[in-house]
Structure formats: structure tokens, C-alpha cells
Amino acid sequence: MTSMKAFFSIFGVFLLLAPAFAAEGGWENLPYKMTLNRHDLIRNGEGKQTWKGKQIYVVALYLIEQSNDPTKILTAEEPTNIRLRITTFGITPNQMKEIIMEGFKRSTNGNIAPLKQRIDSFLTIFDRIYINDVYDLAYIPGTGVEASKNGAALLVIDGLDFKNALYGMFIGDKALQNDLKAKLLSK
């Protein structure tokens, strides 16, 4: 009888922890293919973004045609998407904005002034963050970066220069995390 109680206790703990373990990988919401503006995109690569030793989100890069050339991807006037899925409990909006702002600073070599107003507007998409939230940062030629959360469009930020700065934090010369950059460009 004691072994049955122990089994159910251990099983109960496993059931409580299972969502946390499932969230750690996070790949189930990062499909291999997606459609953007009537264009089929394929996942070029995926990886985990960490910040101060903690995994924050998983991210995938979607392109019309796979590529490992960051310059080509950044300057291409074609539909592309970066999908983020929050994988940690307790990330605050301010922490997420700090991570993203650091990425913009790095990708622009510290010259965020020309983008400041658009960056401030963009950061509002992180005013509320919950585990498993999915953000799409889709570049649509002639429109700009359309940011959506959990499938709902939130805002559009115009300009290829904004796309370059945003995507540059993931795959640019001064990406936030070089191992993540390598994975996004791994094809």
C-alpha cells in the first residue's frame, strides 16, 4: 500500500511539472511551413534565446527560400517572418523590453535615433507577456513589419530599415546570441 502512495505522489508531481518541461522545448508552435501574404514560407532554422542564463523564448526564422546568408535575408524585399514563443514563467514586460532594446542597440551599432519612435511603438507589443504567447514579426514588402500576438495583428511598423534592425538582432553581425544566429541560419 505504501508503494502505491509513493507511486501516486511521484506521478502527481510529474503531472504538475509536465507543462514546465513541455514549455522548455517549445517547438510545437513553430511549424515547418507557414503562409504569409499568400506566400509559402519554410522554417530556415530555430533556436533558444537566453538572457542572463535563463531561456526566455524559442525563435524560428521563416523564408521563401532557405538561406544561410544574413545580408541577403536582411536586405531582401520579400516576405519573411520571425516567430517567438515565450517559454519561461515570470518574464516581465520590462525584462522583455530590455532584451529587445539591447538587440536594437546592437544591431544598429548604438544608433537607434532614426528608429527610436518606431522602436518605442514596437515595444508596446510586450506590455503583457505570458508563457506560451506566440509573436510573429512578419515583414511584408510595401507594408513593413506586421507584429502579431497569438494570431491577432497588433501593429505595423514601416520601413526596410526597421526590418533590418529587428531581424539584425537575431542574425546580424552583432546578434544578441551567436549560437542562436548560427541555428537560425542553419537551413
Image (tube, rainbow, N blue to C red):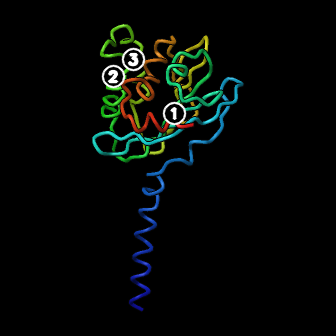
C-alpha gap between disc 1 and disc 2:
19 Å
Q: Secondary structure at mark 2?
A: helix
Q: Quadrant of residue 95?
A: top left
**Is 3 placed above or below 98 here?**
below
Q: Which mark is residue 121?
A: none
**Tag 1 residue:** 185
Q: Few, some or many C-alpha atoms within 10 Å of disc 3 (few <14, some 14-19, many ≥20)? A: some
Question: Do tag 1 and tag 2 residues touch (Cβ < 8 Å)?
Answer: no
**In the depicted view, which residue is nearer to us: 177 or 91?**
177
Say which residue appears at 32% left-offset and 16% top-offset.
109
Q: Few, some or many C-alpha atoms within 10 Å of disc 2 (few <14, some 14-19, many ≥20)? A: many
In this view, the mark in front (1 or 3): 1
- Amino acid type for the residue under numbered disc 2: Arg
Say which residue appears at 45% left-offset and 74% top-offset.
11
N-terminal-most mark, 2 or 3: 2
Q: Few, some or many C-alpha atoms within 10 Å of disc 1 (few <14, some 14-19, many ≥20)? A: many
Q: Secondary structure at mark 3?
A: helix
Q: Secondary structure at mark 1?
A: loop
**Tag 2 residue:** 106
**Tag 3 residue:** 119
Say which residue appears at 54% left-offset and 33% top-offset.
61
